[in-house]
Amino acid sequence: MINNLENILKKKISCKSVWFMRQAGRYLPEFQEIRQNNKNFIELCFNSKLSSEITLQPINRFNLDSAIIFSDILLVPYALGQEVSFIKNLGPELSKINMNKFLKISDDNFYETLKPVYKAIEITRKKLDREKSLISFVGAPWTLLVYMLDLRKGKNKIDTSKLDSSDIEISTILDNLTKFLCLHIKNQIDAGANVVQIFDSWAGFVPEKKINEYCFTPNKKIVEFCRKEKIPNICFPKGLQKKYLEFNNIVQPDGINIDYEVEPVWAKENLKNVVIQGGLHPEALLKTEEEMFKEATKYIQNFKDTPYVFNLGHGLLPETDPDRVKKLIKFYRDF
Ligand code: 1CP
Protein backbone atom coordinates (compact mmCIF):
# COMPACT_ATOMS: atom_id res chain seq x y z
CA MET A 1 0.00 0.00 0.00
CA ILE A 2 3.09 2.24 -0.03
CA ASN A 3 2.05 4.05 -3.23
CA ASN A 4 -1.53 4.67 -2.17
CA LEU A 5 -2.16 8.42 -2.29
CA GLU A 6 -4.91 8.57 0.35
CA ASN A 7 -2.68 6.77 2.86
CA ILE A 8 0.20 9.10 2.09
CA LEU A 9 -2.00 12.14 2.63
CA LYS A 10 -3.59 10.80 5.80
CA LYS A 11 -0.38 9.62 7.44
CA LYS A 12 2.10 12.02 5.83
CA ILE A 13 4.52 9.17 5.27
CA SER A 14 7.42 8.84 2.85
CA CYS A 15 6.44 6.92 -0.19
CA LYS A 16 6.94 6.22 -3.83
CA SER A 17 3.98 7.48 -5.77
CA VAL A 18 3.54 9.12 -9.14
CA TRP A 19 0.72 10.61 -11.21
CA PHE A 20 0.58 13.64 -13.51
CA MET A 21 -1.80 16.55 -13.81
CA ARG A 22 -3.56 16.32 -17.19
CA GLN A 23 -2.45 12.71 -17.53
CA ALA A 24 -5.77 12.00 -19.25
CA GLY A 25 -5.95 14.20 -22.28
CA ARG A 26 -4.73 15.73 -25.44
CA TYR A 27 -1.18 14.27 -25.70
CA LEU A 28 -2.59 10.72 -25.89
CA PRO A 29 -3.58 9.44 -29.37
CA GLU A 30 -6.23 7.21 -27.78
CA PHE A 31 -7.83 10.35 -26.27
CA GLN A 32 -7.64 12.22 -29.58
CA GLU A 33 -9.45 9.35 -31.24
CA ILE A 34 -12.39 9.64 -28.86
CA ARG A 35 -12.27 13.44 -29.00
CA GLN A 36 -12.48 13.44 -32.81
CA ASN A 37 -15.82 11.67 -32.63
CA ASN A 38 -17.04 13.87 -29.77
CA LYS A 39 -16.69 17.48 -30.84
CA ASN A 40 -18.70 18.91 -27.97
CA PHE A 41 -16.35 18.87 -24.98
CA ILE A 42 -19.04 19.38 -22.33
CA GLU A 43 -21.06 16.52 -23.77
CA LEU A 44 -17.96 14.35 -23.67
CA CYS A 45 -17.43 15.22 -19.99
CA PHE A 46 -21.04 14.18 -19.33
CA ASN A 47 -20.65 10.85 -21.13
CA SER A 48 -19.97 8.66 -18.09
CA LYS A 49 -18.82 5.64 -20.05
CA LEU A 50 -16.36 7.56 -22.23
CA SER A 51 -15.22 9.72 -19.31
CA SER A 52 -14.36 6.58 -17.37
CA GLU A 53 -12.59 5.11 -20.37
CA ILE A 54 -10.47 8.28 -20.81
CA THR A 55 -9.64 8.29 -17.09
CA LEU A 56 -8.24 4.78 -17.38
CA GLN A 57 -6.25 5.38 -20.59
CA PRO A 58 -3.07 6.67 -18.88
CA ILE A 59 -3.38 3.98 -16.18
CA ASN A 60 -3.51 1.22 -18.77
CA ARG A 61 -0.64 2.74 -20.71
CA PHE A 62 1.73 3.69 -17.86
CA ASN A 63 0.46 1.93 -14.73
CA LEU A 64 0.44 5.21 -12.78
CA ASP A 65 -0.28 5.04 -9.04
CA SER A 66 -3.40 7.21 -9.18
CA ALA A 67 -6.13 8.01 -11.68
CA ILE A 68 -7.74 11.47 -11.94
CA ILE A 69 -11.30 11.52 -13.17
CA PHE A 70 -11.74 12.97 -16.64
CA SER A 71 -13.98 16.00 -16.16
CA ASP A 72 -13.47 19.77 -16.02
CA ILE A 73 -13.52 22.51 -13.40
CA LEU A 74 -15.99 24.47 -15.55
CA LEU A 75 -18.77 21.91 -15.13
CA VAL A 76 -19.57 23.66 -11.84
CA PRO A 77 -20.32 27.08 -13.41
CA TYR A 78 -22.29 25.13 -16.02
CA ALA A 79 -24.34 23.42 -13.32
CA LEU A 80 -24.90 26.85 -11.77
CA GLY A 81 -26.51 28.19 -14.92
CA GLN A 82 -23.82 29.45 -17.30
CA GLU A 83 -23.40 28.17 -20.85
CA VAL A 84 -19.87 26.83 -21.39
CA SER A 85 -18.23 26.24 -24.75
CA PHE A 86 -14.69 25.25 -25.59
CA ILE A 87 -13.30 27.04 -28.59
CA LYS A 88 -10.36 25.48 -30.35
CA ASN A 89 -7.10 27.37 -29.65
CA LEU A 90 -8.97 29.98 -27.59
CA GLY A 91 -10.04 27.94 -24.60
CA PRO A 92 -13.29 28.01 -22.68
CA GLU A 93 -15.93 30.70 -23.11
CA LEU A 94 -18.84 31.24 -20.72
CA SER A 95 -22.08 33.12 -21.21
CA LYS A 96 -22.68 36.16 -19.02
CA ILE A 97 -23.53 35.27 -15.43
CA ASN A 98 -27.16 35.68 -14.41
CA MET A 99 -27.03 36.31 -10.66
CA ASN A 100 -30.69 35.48 -10.11
CA LYS A 101 -30.28 32.09 -11.70
CA PHE A 102 -26.87 31.51 -10.07
CA LEU A 103 -28.20 32.11 -6.57
CA LYS A 104 -31.40 30.11 -7.09
CA ILE A 105 -30.02 26.74 -8.19
CA SER A 106 -31.00 24.10 -5.64
CA ASP A 107 -28.73 21.34 -4.31
CA ASP A 108 -30.93 18.76 -6.03
CA ASN A 109 -30.80 20.55 -9.34
CA PHE A 110 -27.00 20.84 -9.06
CA TYR A 111 -26.72 17.12 -8.26
CA GLU A 112 -28.93 16.15 -11.19
CA THR A 113 -26.81 18.13 -13.67
CA LEU A 114 -23.54 16.65 -12.41
CA LYS A 115 -24.86 13.12 -11.93
CA PRO A 116 -22.97 11.80 -15.01
CA VAL A 117 -19.68 12.81 -13.34
CA TYR A 118 -20.61 10.84 -10.24
CA LYS A 119 -21.63 7.91 -12.39
CA ALA A 120 -18.25 8.05 -14.19
CA ILE A 121 -16.50 7.92 -10.81
CA GLU A 122 -18.62 4.94 -9.79
CA ILE A 123 -17.77 3.02 -12.98
CA THR A 124 -14.08 3.92 -12.75
CA ARG A 125 -13.68 2.98 -9.09
CA LYS A 126 -15.02 -0.50 -9.89
CA LYS A 127 -12.50 -0.98 -12.70
CA LEU A 128 -9.46 0.54 -11.00
CA ASP A 129 -7.03 -1.63 -8.97
CA ARG A 130 -7.88 -1.40 -5.29
CA GLU A 131 -4.47 -0.08 -4.28
CA LYS A 132 -4.69 2.83 -6.72
CA SER A 133 -6.39 6.05 -5.63
CA LEU A 134 -9.05 7.76 -7.70
CA ILE A 135 -8.61 11.53 -7.55
CA SER A 136 -11.56 13.88 -7.95
CA PHE A 137 -11.11 17.62 -8.33
CA VAL A 138 -12.67 21.06 -8.26
CA GLY A 139 -11.53 24.53 -9.31
CA ALA A 140 -11.05 26.90 -6.37
CA PRO A 141 -13.62 29.73 -6.20
CA TRP A 142 -11.22 32.46 -7.43
CA THR A 143 -10.11 30.41 -10.45
CA LEU A 144 -13.74 29.71 -11.37
CA LEU A 145 -14.54 33.41 -10.95
CA VAL A 146 -11.81 34.27 -13.50
CA TYR A 147 -13.71 32.24 -16.11
CA MET A 148 -17.19 33.15 -14.92
CA LEU A 149 -16.59 36.90 -15.16
CA ASP A 150 -14.30 36.54 -18.17
CA LEU A 151 -11.35 38.19 -16.43
CA ARG A 152 -8.72 36.59 -18.65
CA LYS A 153 -6.74 38.92 -20.86
CA GLY A 154 -4.62 36.52 -22.89
CA LYS A 155 -2.83 33.60 -21.31
CA ASN A 156 -0.97 35.43 -18.61
CA LYS A 157 -2.94 38.46 -17.55
CA ILE A 158 -6.22 39.30 -15.92
CA ASP A 159 -8.43 42.33 -16.17
CA THR A 160 -8.82 43.53 -12.57
CA SER A 161 -10.82 46.57 -13.64
CA LYS A 162 -13.77 44.24 -14.00
CA LEU A 163 -13.44 43.38 -10.32
CA ASP A 164 -13.52 47.01 -9.20
CA SER A 165 -16.23 48.20 -11.55
CA SER A 166 -18.36 45.11 -11.25
CA ASP A 167 -21.75 45.76 -9.72
CA ILE A 168 -21.87 42.09 -8.94
CA GLU A 169 -20.95 41.24 -5.38
CA ILE A 170 -17.73 39.24 -5.65
CA SER A 171 -18.01 37.92 -2.10
CA THR A 172 -21.53 36.67 -2.78
CA ILE A 173 -20.28 34.72 -5.80
CA LEU A 174 -17.28 33.28 -3.93
CA ASP A 175 -19.44 32.20 -0.99
CA ASN A 176 -22.05 30.54 -3.18
CA LEU A 177 -19.32 28.79 -5.17
CA THR A 178 -17.65 27.57 -1.97
CA LYS A 179 -20.91 26.04 -0.83
CA PHE A 180 -21.47 24.19 -4.10
CA LEU A 181 -17.84 23.13 -4.43
CA CYS A 182 -18.05 21.44 -1.02
CA LEU A 183 -21.19 19.69 -2.20
CA HIS A 184 -19.47 18.62 -5.43
CA ILE A 185 -16.51 17.26 -3.45
CA LYS A 186 -18.80 15.31 -1.13
CA ASN A 187 -20.79 13.89 -4.04
CA GLN A 188 -17.61 12.77 -5.82
CA ILE A 189 -16.30 11.09 -2.66
CA ASP A 190 -19.66 9.40 -2.06
CA ALA A 191 -19.49 8.08 -5.63
CA GLY A 192 -16.15 6.41 -4.89
CA ALA A 193 -13.35 8.98 -5.30
CA ASN A 194 -10.63 8.75 -2.62
CA VAL A 195 -8.92 12.14 -2.78
CA VAL A 196 -9.74 15.65 -3.96
CA GLN A 197 -7.40 18.14 -5.60
CA ILE A 198 -8.37 21.82 -5.49
CA PHE A 199 -7.00 23.70 -8.50
CA ASP A 200 -6.40 27.41 -7.92
CA SER A 201 -4.66 27.80 -11.27
CA TRP A 202 -5.05 31.61 -11.29
CA ALA A 203 -4.01 32.19 -7.64
CA GLY A 204 -0.91 34.08 -8.81
CA PHE A 205 -3.15 36.74 -10.35
CA VAL A 206 -5.19 37.67 -7.28
CA PRO A 207 -4.69 41.39 -6.57
CA GLU A 208 -2.19 41.68 -3.70
CA LYS A 209 -4.57 43.22 -1.17
CA LYS A 210 -7.28 40.66 -1.92
CA ILE A 211 -5.15 37.57 -1.39
CA ASN A 212 -6.81 36.65 1.90
CA GLU A 213 -10.34 37.28 0.74
CA TYR A 214 -10.11 35.71 -2.74
CA CYS A 215 -7.56 32.95 -2.25
CA PHE A 216 -6.61 31.92 1.31
CA THR A 217 -10.07 32.11 2.89
CA PRO A 218 -12.06 30.20 0.23
CA ASN A 219 -9.39 27.47 0.02
CA LYS A 220 -9.33 27.29 3.82
CA LYS A 221 -13.10 26.88 4.02
CA ILE A 222 -12.97 24.02 1.51
CA VAL A 223 -10.06 22.31 3.29
CA GLU A 224 -11.87 22.66 6.63
CA PHE A 225 -14.90 21.02 5.08
CA CYS A 226 -12.67 18.19 3.83
CA ARG A 227 -11.11 17.77 7.26
CA LYS A 228 -14.56 17.56 8.87
CA GLU A 229 -15.56 14.93 6.31
CA LYS A 230 -12.17 13.13 6.51
CA ILE A 231 -11.50 13.69 2.81
CA PRO A 232 -7.80 13.61 1.84
CA ASN A 233 -7.10 16.86 0.00
CA ILE A 234 -4.39 18.52 -2.10
CA CYS A 235 -4.26 22.25 -2.90
CA PHE A 236 -2.63 23.73 -5.99
CA PRO A 237 -2.38 27.52 -5.59
CA LYS A 238 -0.40 28.08 -8.79
CA GLY A 239 1.77 31.16 -9.08
CA LEU A 240 1.90 32.20 -5.42
CA GLN A 241 5.72 32.10 -5.28
CA LYS A 242 6.87 32.83 -1.70
CA LYS A 243 3.24 33.19 -0.61
CA TYR A 244 3.05 29.38 -0.81
CA LEU A 245 4.36 29.55 2.76
CA GLU A 246 1.52 31.75 4.02
CA PHE A 247 -0.99 29.71 2.04
CA ASN A 248 0.22 26.47 3.61
CA ASN A 249 0.21 27.89 7.14
CA ILE A 250 -3.27 29.36 6.81
CA VAL A 251 -5.05 26.74 4.72
CA GLN A 252 -3.29 23.65 6.17
CA PRO A 253 -4.15 21.16 3.42
CA ASP A 254 -3.05 17.51 3.56
CA GLY A 255 -1.06 17.96 0.37
CA ILE A 256 0.26 20.91 -1.61
CA ASN A 257 1.25 20.85 -5.28
CA ILE A 258 4.13 23.23 -5.96
CA ASP A 259 4.38 24.86 -9.39
CA TYR A 260 7.58 25.05 -11.48
CA GLU A 261 8.49 28.51 -10.15
CA VAL A 262 8.85 27.23 -6.58
CA GLU A 263 12.40 26.19 -5.67
CA PRO A 264 12.27 22.60 -4.34
CA VAL A 265 14.95 23.30 -1.69
CA TRP A 266 12.97 26.30 -0.45
CA ALA A 267 9.75 24.25 -0.45
CA LYS A 268 11.29 21.47 1.64
CA GLU A 269 12.57 23.98 4.19
CA ASN A 270 9.43 26.07 4.41
CA LEU A 271 6.34 23.97 3.71
CA LYS A 272 5.77 21.96 6.87
CA ASN A 273 3.18 19.42 8.05
CA VAL A 274 2.11 18.82 4.48
CA VAL A 275 2.81 16.29 1.73
CA ILE A 276 4.53 18.11 -1.11
CA GLN A 277 3.59 17.10 -4.64
CA GLY A 278 4.93 17.97 -8.08
CA GLY A 279 7.05 20.86 -9.23
CA LEU A 280 8.79 19.61 -12.39
CA HIS A 281 8.23 21.93 -15.34
CA PRO A 282 6.00 20.25 -17.96
CA GLU A 283 8.36 21.67 -20.58
CA ALA A 284 11.09 19.38 -19.21
CA LEU A 285 9.36 16.57 -21.09
CA LEU A 286 9.86 18.45 -24.35
CA LYS A 287 13.65 18.73 -23.91
CA THR A 288 16.31 16.07 -24.54
CA GLU A 289 16.03 12.95 -22.42
CA GLU A 290 19.20 13.85 -20.61
CA GLU A 291 17.87 17.30 -19.66
CA MET A 292 14.53 15.84 -18.60
CA PHE A 293 16.23 13.35 -16.25
CA LYS A 294 18.51 16.06 -14.91
CA GLU A 295 15.58 18.32 -14.03
CA ALA A 296 13.60 15.44 -12.55
CA THR A 297 16.61 14.44 -10.40
CA LYS A 298 16.54 17.89 -8.78
CA TYR A 299 13.11 17.09 -7.33
CA ILE A 300 13.52 13.38 -6.63
CA GLN A 301 16.87 13.87 -4.87
CA ASN A 302 15.70 16.85 -2.84
CA PHE A 303 12.51 15.17 -1.60
CA LYS A 304 13.80 11.60 -1.32
CA ASP A 305 13.42 11.30 2.46
CA THR A 306 10.25 13.37 2.89
CA PRO A 307 6.60 12.67 2.11
CA TYR A 308 6.61 13.63 -1.56
CA VAL A 309 4.41 12.65 -4.50
CA PHE A 310 6.10 12.85 -7.89
CA ASN A 311 4.13 15.02 -10.33
CA LEU A 312 4.55 18.21 -12.38
CA GLY A 313 4.42 21.95 -11.75
CA HIS A 314 1.41 22.22 -14.08
CA GLY A 315 -0.40 19.93 -16.52
CA LEU A 316 1.23 17.81 -19.22
CA LEU A 317 1.39 19.80 -22.46
CA PRO A 318 -0.57 18.60 -25.51
CA GLU A 319 2.67 18.31 -27.54
CA THR A 320 4.24 15.85 -25.05
CA ASP A 321 5.42 12.55 -26.51
CA PRO A 322 3.73 9.74 -24.52
CA ASP A 323 6.96 7.75 -24.75
CA ARG A 324 8.66 10.48 -22.70
CA VAL A 325 6.05 10.13 -19.99
CA LYS A 326 6.79 6.41 -19.88
CA LYS A 327 10.55 7.05 -19.61
CA LEU A 328 10.08 9.63 -16.86
CA ILE A 329 7.98 7.25 -14.78
CA LYS A 330 10.56 4.48 -15.19
CA PHE A 331 13.36 6.90 -14.26
CA TYR A 332 11.50 7.88 -11.07
CA ARG A 333 10.73 4.29 -10.10
CA ASP A 334 14.30 3.11 -10.73
CA PHE A 335 15.81 6.01 -8.78
O1 1CP B 1 -9.63 18.31 -26.22
C1 1CP B 1 -9.72 19.44 -25.76
O2 1CP B 1 -9.56 20.47 -26.43
C2 1CP B 1 -10.06 19.59 -24.34
C3 1CP B 1 -8.91 19.87 -23.50
C4 1CP B 1 -9.29 19.70 -22.06
C5 1CP B 1 -9.08 18.56 -21.26
C6 1CP B 1 -8.45 17.27 -21.65
C7 1CP B 1 -9.97 20.65 -21.25
C8 1CP B 1 -10.46 21.97 -21.68
N1 1CP B 1 -10.18 20.10 -20.00
C9 1CP B 1 -9.65 18.84 -19.96
C10 1CP B 1 -9.74 17.91 -18.81
C11 1CP B 1 -9.34 18.41 -17.48
N2 1CP B 1 -9.40 19.69 -17.01
C12 1CP B 1 -8.87 17.60 -16.44
C13 1CP B 1 -8.86 16.08 -16.60
C14 1CP B 1 -8.12 15.18 -15.87
C15 1CP B 1 -6.61 15.20 -16.04
O3 1CP B 1 -5.97 16.05 -15.45
O4 1CP B 1 -6.10 14.25 -16.67
C16 1CP B 1 -8.59 18.45 -15.35
C17 1CP B 1 -8.03 18.09 -13.99
C18 1CP B 1 -8.94 19.75 -15.74
C19 1CP B 1 -8.86 20.92 -14.85
C20 1CP B 1 -8.90 22.29 -15.43
N3 1CP B 1 -9.68 22.75 -16.45
C21 1CP B 1 -8.16 23.38 -14.92
C22 1CP B 1 -7.26 23.33 -13.73
C23 1CP B 1 -5.94 22.78 -14.03
C24 1CP B 1 -5.04 23.59 -14.93
O5 1CP B 1 -4.68 23.07 -15.98
O6 1CP B 1 -4.71 24.72 -14.56
C25 1CP B 1 -8.48 24.51 -15.69
C26 1CP B 1 -7.94 25.91 -15.53
C27 1CP B 1 -9.45 24.09 -16.66
C28 1CP B 1 -10.09 24.95 -17.68
C29 1CP B 1 -9.82 24.41 -19.02
N4 1CP B 1 -10.49 23.36 -19.55
C30 1CP B 1 -10.00 23.08 -20.81
C31 1CP B 1 -8.97 24.01 -21.09
C32 1CP B 1 -8.21 24.11 -22.37
C33 1CP B 1 -8.83 24.81 -19.93
C34 1CP B 1 -7.77 25.86 -19.67
C35 1CP B 1 -7.90 27.05 -20.51
C36 1CP B 1 -7.07 28.18 -20.00
O7 1CP B 1 -5.82 28.09 -20.05
O8 1CP B 1 -7.68 29.15 -19.55
Image (spheres, rainbow, N blue to C red):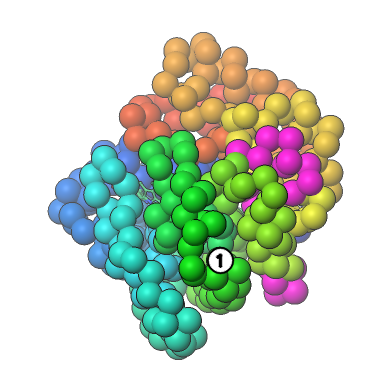
Q: Secondary structure at mark 1?
A: helix
Residue at 42% in and 67% down: 77
Q: Amino acid at mark 1?
A: Ile
Residue at 72% in and 42% down: 244
**Image location (x, y in percent) of residue 300:** 68, 27
Front residue of 137 and 92: 92
Above or below 182: residue 94: above
**Image location (x, y in percent) of residue 325:** 45, 30
Does residue 54 appear left or right of residue 43 in this picture?
right
Residue 217: say if magenta: no
**Image location (x, y in percent) of residue 39:** 18, 54
Q: Where's the C terminus, which quadrant?
A: top right
Front residue of 65 and 242: 242
Does residue 328 appear left or right of residue 208 in this picture?
left
Q: Which residue is mark 1?
A: 170
Residue at 74% in and 35% down: 242
Residue at 33% in and 29% down: 319
Does residue 198 appear left or right of residue 302 in this picture?
left
Does mark 1's beta carbon lie closer than 8 Å to ligand 1? no
Magenta stretch, residue numbers: 225-247
Front residue of 295 and 130: 295
